[in-house]
Amino acid sequence: MKKNDQILCNCCGKELSRQGSRYEDHLHIVKSWGYLSAQDGIVEEMDICPDCLEKWKRTFVIASEKHSQTELL
Ligand SMILES: [Zn+2]
């Protein structure tokens, strides 16, 4: 969640660290809910810190897939 120039984790409320204009790498989700969904027309945004993401992933029944990046962004 962006608040002024801070990004707060939606799960734990922790402020993500920042160096200059770059924030600690984290999961940023923007979901535009579509037709036939219960939230049709709603755009939902959230930021999840690395610690919360790891905890969340441990609850998955099927693990996420991981691939090496051939080009670093
Ligand atoms: Zn968190």
Image (cartoon, rainbow, N blue to C red):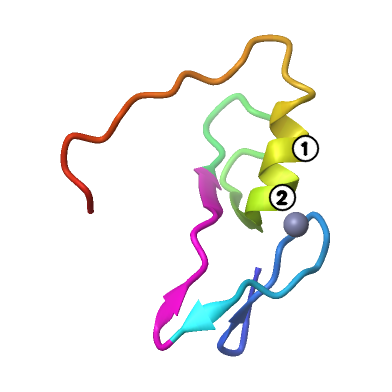
Q: Specify the quadrant of the image occupied by residue 62.
A: top right
- The single residue placed furthest to the left in the displayed view is 71
Query: Start and end of the magenta stretch?
Result: 20-31
The type of residue carrying mark 1 is Lys
Which residue, as the protein is rendered here, is positioned at the far top?
Answer: 62
Q: Secondary structure at mark 1?
A: helix
Q: Residue at x 39, y 84 (%)?
A: 21
Image side of residue 54 versus residue 31, left or right: right
- Residue under label 2: 51
Residue drawn at point x = 16 percent, y = 42 percent: 71
* Residue picked out by circle 1: 55
Q: Is residue 38 above or below residue 14?
A: above
| Residue 5 image point, x, y percent | 56, 88
Helix, strand or loop at disc 2? helix
41 left or right, relative to 19? right
Q: Quadrant of residue 67?
A: top left
Ligand 1 contact, mark 2 (Cβ < 8 Å): yes
Q: Are marks 2 and 1 in contact (CB under 8 Å)?
A: yes
Decide if residue 18 is on the left or right side of residue 8.
left
Residue sitting at x 43%, y 23% = 66
Q: Nearer the viewer, residue 57 or 35?
A: 57
On the rendered image, what quadrant is the N terminus found in? bottom right
- Identified by mark 2, the residue type is Asp
Mark 2–mark 1 Cα distance, whole angstroms, equals 6 Å
Q: Position of residue 3 (x, y in %)?
A: 65, 82
Q: Is residue 22 left or right of residue 72?
A: right
| Whether residue 46 is situated above or below residue 24 in the rendered picture | above
x%, y% of residue 6?
61, 83
Quadrant in which ligand 1 is drawn:
bottom right
